[in-house]
């Protein structure tokens, strides 16, 4: 539903939903973080991700936290802080496909 | 006006100058940092190893050098053809980190990850580790070729720059000492060849930048390989002589 609304550029609806949602429902924090992420507001996105907890989506949470950390770096050439976060995401899974996603992120950062 | 533009383009067309490549490759420095993918050790003993000295004996230039190996150009009246081969030799300036500091920090990090022992301070360690970087060299070709023809009412051109493949070599000697006596001495050598970068870039300076990054990436991979091997070898060496009962870790993310 969220991705559909994003695709349809229904930003007002999403914002209204975020303003009125019940933060006790965990997934809402993820929705809010994705909304802010799509608006390049990485500090807000990270703060919502840090509140979000779901063992099934833990890798996604850690990966997005690492992405936000990277985007918030003042000097992107010194990416040690982001690398440490990506390392946490990498170590959180045994799935080779998910590990390759992290590896590709590092490659992207190096060549950017 | 258009005519003069073509004449001007004809006159300036030619291979990329070695000095220009060298300047672009020295513009920035790049990190050797990498993602650790070794298996996290499920056990840690109280055996402590301190990284005592890290010497860099490798002959490495301060800055990256680009030398023209061979090249020719045929600047005729209506056609201009060129081909040049340059050799790029990596220098210290390409690395963002100090080599010795990077090796020491990365080894300490790897010990904490895959070592069955712990990284100790120099105060009173069980073992001391001495390292020396004997070879650290990355070099590879940069080829520039193309043609431009001008026939009054028509013109045509083609040009391409190719970078790589570069060969990166790293040799490290390692001495493990207990009470000043060498108990384990080993040398490690690895080599990695980068892929050739031959896709079209709108700006050749970006190609030269990516070439520099690929060289640093190859060196980084070599450091990773050797560091993992050093920790693995020390694990093997210490295994039969572990004085302490292993301590099993139960932290999240660590598989037992």
Image (tube, grey):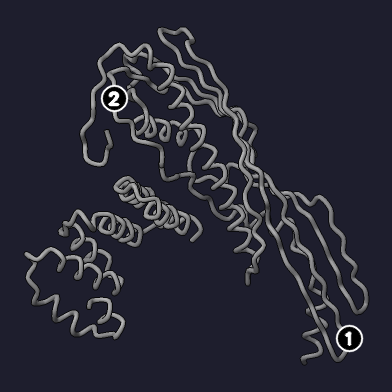
**Residue B225: image x %, image y %?**
51, 36
Residue under label 2: B44
Quarter of the figure with residue A106: bottom left
Instruction: State the separation of the CA atoms marked 1 and 2.
Output: 76 Å
Q: Classify the position of the N terminus of chain B by image quarter.
A: bottom right
- The front one of B5 and B216 is B216
Quarter of the figure with residue B18: bottom right
Q: Earlier in the sequence, mark 1 or mark 2?
A: 2
Residue B122, above or below B89: above
Image-based side of B171 in relation to A50, left or right: right
**Residue B214: image x %, image y %?**
58, 51
The kind of secondary structure element at disc 2 is strand
Classify 10 Å Cα crowding around label 1: few (below 14), some (14-19), many (20 and above): few
Q: Which label number is shown at residue B26?
A: none
Residue under label 1: B151
Image-based side of B43 in relation to B59, left or right: left
Nearer the observer: mark 1 or 2; the answer is 2
């Amino acid at each position: 539903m969220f991705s559909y609304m994003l695709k349809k550029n229904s930003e007002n609806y999403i914002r209204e939903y975020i303003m009125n949602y019940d933060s006790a429902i965990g997934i809402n924090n993820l929705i809010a973080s994705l909304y802010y992420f799509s608006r390049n507001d990485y500090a807000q996105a990270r703060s919502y991700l840090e509140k979000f907890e779901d063992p099934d989506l833990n890798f996604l949470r850690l990966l997005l936290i690492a992405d936000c950390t990277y985007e918030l770096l003042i000097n992107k050439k010194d990416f040690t802080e982001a690398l440490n976060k990506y390392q946490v995401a990498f170590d959180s899974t045994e799935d080779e496909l998910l590990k390759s996603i992290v590896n590709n992120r590092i490659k992207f950062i190096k060549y950017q | 006006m258009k005519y003069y533009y073509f004449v001007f383009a004809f006159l300036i067309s030619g291979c990329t100058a070695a000095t220009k490549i060298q300047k672009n490759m020295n513009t920035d420095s790049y990190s050797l940092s990498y993602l650790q993918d070794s298996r996290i050790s499920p056990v840690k003993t109280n055996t402590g190893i301190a990284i005592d000295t890290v010497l860099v004996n490798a002959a490495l230039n301060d800055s990256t050098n680009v030398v023209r190996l061979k090249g020719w150009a045929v600047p005729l009246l209506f056609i201009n053809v060129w081909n040049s081969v340059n050799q790029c030799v990596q220098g210290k300036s390409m690395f963002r980190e100090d080599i010795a500091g990077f090796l020491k920090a990365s080894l300490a990090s790897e010990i904490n990850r895959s070592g069955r022992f712990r990284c100790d301070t120099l105060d009173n360690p069980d073992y001391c580790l001495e390292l020396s970087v004997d070879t650290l060299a990355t070099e590879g070709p940069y080829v520039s070729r193309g043609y431009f023809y001008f026939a009054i009412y028509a013109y045509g051109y083609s040009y391409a720059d190719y970078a790589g493949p570069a060969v990166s070599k790293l040799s490290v000697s390692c001495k493990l000492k207990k009470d000043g006596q060498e108990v384990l001495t080993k040398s490690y050598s690895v080599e990695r060849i980068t892929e050739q970068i031959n896709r079209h870039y709108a700006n050749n300076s970006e190609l030269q930048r990516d070439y520099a990054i690929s060289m640093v990436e190859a060196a980084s991979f070599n450091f990773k390989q050797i560091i993992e091997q050093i920790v693995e070898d020390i694990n093997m060496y210490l295994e039969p002589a572990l004085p302490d009962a292993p301590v099993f870790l139960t932290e999240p993310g660590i598989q037992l």
